Amino acid sequence: MFMPFLAFLLMAAPAWGGQEPPLLIRAERLAHLRQETGDIYDAEGSVKVTQGPLQLTAGRLTVLTAKAELVATGGASFTLCDCKTSPAWSIAADYLHLKMDQRFVARRALFYIRGVPVAYLPYFTYPVSRQSGLLIPRLGYSSRWGVSYKQPIYWAIAPDKDATLTLESKGSRGEGVGVEYRSRPNGTEETHLQVEYFRDREFQVDRWALESRYRKHLTDQADVRLRLSYVNYNDHHRALSDLSGRRADSQAESDLLVTYRTQKSLAYLLTRYTLNLSTPSNNTTVQRLPEIGYQLTQTRLSRFPVYAGLTSSAVHFFRQAGERLVRFDLYPKLSMPMALSQQVTLTPWAGARMVSYDRSTRSRESFLRTAVPVGVHLEGRFLSPFETVRLTTTSALTYENIATNGRQDAPQFDDLDKIHNRQSVTATFSQRLHSSDASPDVLYWHLAETISHATPSASDLYGIFRFRPLPMLSIGNNFFYRWADHSFSAWNTNLTLDPSPLFSVVLGRRSTRHATLPQRGDVFNTSYLGDLESVAPIRAWSGQITASLPGGIGFTSSTYFDGNQKQFAEMQYTLRIDRQCWAAELSYLDLPTRNDLLFTIQMKGL
């Protein structure tokens, strides 16, 4: 038996270019051995392909070494289950033809699950390598629309690009088709395009959706990014998507961004179009068509202890209904950090901001607003002397005096247009308790508050708190505390329990009591708590449980309860069974308007 086996390896070696033969066959008898063809009787063997191990049995196996092909007859069967006995699935056929690195063809075949025939296949082809063909479909049922079916078809266009065509039926709701194209010709370029069409028979409308992403590294310093997002009906994702994140989208943004970076500077070109999905009309939505900017990081001036920085931009704001204008912004800034000690640094700074507005060609009205900000930043950073556990304390005081002149009725497009006179002091204090290694912080908390000359009282106290008393338990919280009525105007909490990689629980609460909250940060100070902004009252609870059980069984449950509506806005349960040779997933989605049941099965290797 050893000699025939050795002879076969010698015969097969030239076909694999001197590499280790991927084919290993054991047989009772080897006959008709020639240079390019050999017949093997009563064969039993295995071959490894790119998708995984393949086990083949046949009464007769013909090997065409020159063409790297196998022909199996006489009760032939194969499976990609890497198990010695009782495979989860297999295919038996009168005739099997394997072209290495291409495809497997079976004629007059039976599909078996656990040894039980479940389907007859007159003709079946399976791509050994990446090739075009049908993918496994997805079945579902909706309490509102009935049975749904989604059939993807894969197209291997080239080694660096492929596409998927998806045919979909949502029962009485309608039918649709989607095309997804992917390309990655090299490590510096990537393209992803997805187009969806759905004929909505419930509302008698045609729905379109487009998503596209393109990235390219032009040089080591220059990059270009293109993003397109469009729906012809604002409720497209809310009505049709199975993903909770997509259903919650409030806008769709399309933009083109070109950047050029050096060690100390950044130049960019941005063109952005925003589609507001929460309003019936997009006529008043502000668009940036385009924006050009240049930024210079704080750079030391020669040998002097003075640092200079620059922020500049030119933006054309456009909206279909309303004001259109071009805004120019120039903001040079000087700073001089001084070390009062090893732990304390005092940094005085000053700048001059000039913002020019040109109200397009209709009126040719232009005006200039200027701001002269000056301030002092005092920061102390203290480290504990312990080696295994470190406590880092950081405190800072920032004084700002901003004097503006010019017209105060500038249009309000973004934070830059909200510049006004102010004298304020912002205080921050934070502590971080952590070990010397890269493990997460045991404790982190941060407080910030602003006292302004224009307001009779201090701003709401803003706080962040994160605590991890055990490796399996963490608590996170951020809040606003209002001194006027001694209450929390906003409170957001997350509790995470993950005792093992097999089980985790996440609970969250979102609460906003008041109609206004301080705006966090502005164009001069990221810690400033100043102008109030309107917020919607929120009372909501969320939860998620993830568990991995023995036998490859996984379970995920997520819920979202809306306290204002006093109802569960969404509940989703997913059960997944992942075995060596197959996987199945069953999802149940409970929404206020419908219930959906989705089922997916995967035969690994197919």
Image (spheres, helix red, strand yellow):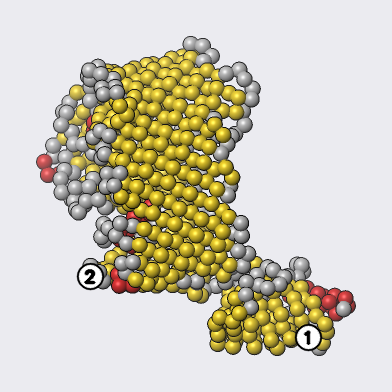
Q: Residues within 10 Å of mark 2 (few under 14, many from 20)?
A: few
Q: Position of residue 472 (x, y in %)?
A: 56, 39
Q: Is residue 120 above or below residue 101?
A: below
Mark with earlier residue (2, 1): 1
Name the secondary structure under disc 1.
Answer: strand
- Compare residues 536 and 124 and report the one nearer the observer: 536
Residue type highlighted by circle 1: Tyr
- Residue 567 located left or right of residue 476: left
Question: Which residue is rendered at x = 59% and y = 59% of the image?
Answer: 552
- Compare residues 238 and 312 and report the one nearer the observer: 238
- Compare residues 604 and 468 and report the one nearer the observer: 468
Q: Within the image, what quadrant is residue 453 found in? A: top left
Decide if residue 165 is in sight here: no
Q: Position of residue 283 (x, y in %)?
A: 18, 51
Question: Which residue is rendered at x = 64% and y = 82% of the image?
Answer: 92
Residue ID for mark 1: 41
Residue ID for mark 2: 204
Question: Which residue is rendered at x = 30% and y = 64% of the image?
Answer: 208
Residue type highlighted by circle 2: Gln
Q: Residues within 10 Å of mark 1 (few under 14, many from 20)?
A: some
Q: Residue furthest left?
A: 363
Q: Is residue 308 above or below residue 499?
A: above
Decide if residue 111 is in sight here: yes
